[in-house]
Image (cartoon, helix red, strand yellow):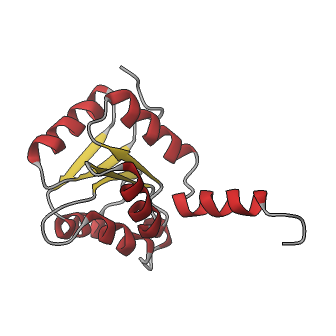
Amino acid sequence: MTTLNGSALKVLVVDDNAEMRLLMRSLLESAAVAEIREAGSVDSAWEALAGWRPDIALVDYQMPGTEGGRLIEWIRAAPDPTLARLPVIMITGHSASETLARATASGANDFIVKPFNARVLLSRIERCLRDPRTIADMVSERHRGSAPEGA
């Protein structure tokens, strides 16, 4: 199993499905993640973030009540700059194009479509920690880079 760089890594897992939280916890523990906290709802995740700063958050898209995309929007709008820049990966069982649009709009750094394996999860976490740009930032940069001269 891949080990993430930095034994002090802190991860927040937000998913209403207890089995999915357990699966992600297991994958993260096998990669030697130091601290993993779980939240079963957007509200409980927001409460956790009030007094704790993880290095990255894994947020399920579709949850009862408030959806995961809304949590990401709250994070991006937070007055605390450390929280506002928190890398967030949206996780969903929906189609890639639907998820990409919502993940981009909410300010996610990346997204993963279920089902996924440990390699995918860990490589996306590593990428987001190494390059914390949001999907929207990357798309914008790509468009600026391909724009005709003088545009």
User: Residue 21: which quarter of the image?
Assistant: top left
Does 58 appear above or below 70? above
Going 69% across and 56% down the picture, which residue do you hit? Answer: 142
Does 117 appear above or below 17? above
User: Residue 48: which quarter of the image?
Assistant: bottom left
On the rendered structure, is 70 left or right of 87? left
Going 44% across and 80% down the picture, which residue do you hit? Answer: 79
Does 56 appear above or below 116? below
**Where is residue 9 drawn, in percent x and y?**
39, 42
Going 21% across and 32% down the picture, which residue do you hit? Answer: 26
Residue situated in front as seen by the camera: 149 or 92:
149
Quarter of the image with the C terminus is bottom right
Could you tell me how many numbered marks the image carries? 0
Quarter of the image with the N terminus is top left
**Where is residue 73 drawn, in percent x and y?**
38, 72
Q: Residue furthest right?
A: 150
On the rendered structure, is 120 left or right of 145? left
Residue situated in front as seen by the camera: 51 or 116:
116
Q: Residue furthest left?
A: 18
**Where is residue 103 drawn, in percent x and y?**
41, 61
Going 47% across and 66% down the picture, which residue do you hit? Answer: 82
**Where is residue 62 drawn, in percent x and y?**
22, 60
Residue situated in front as seen by the camera: 117 or 5:
117
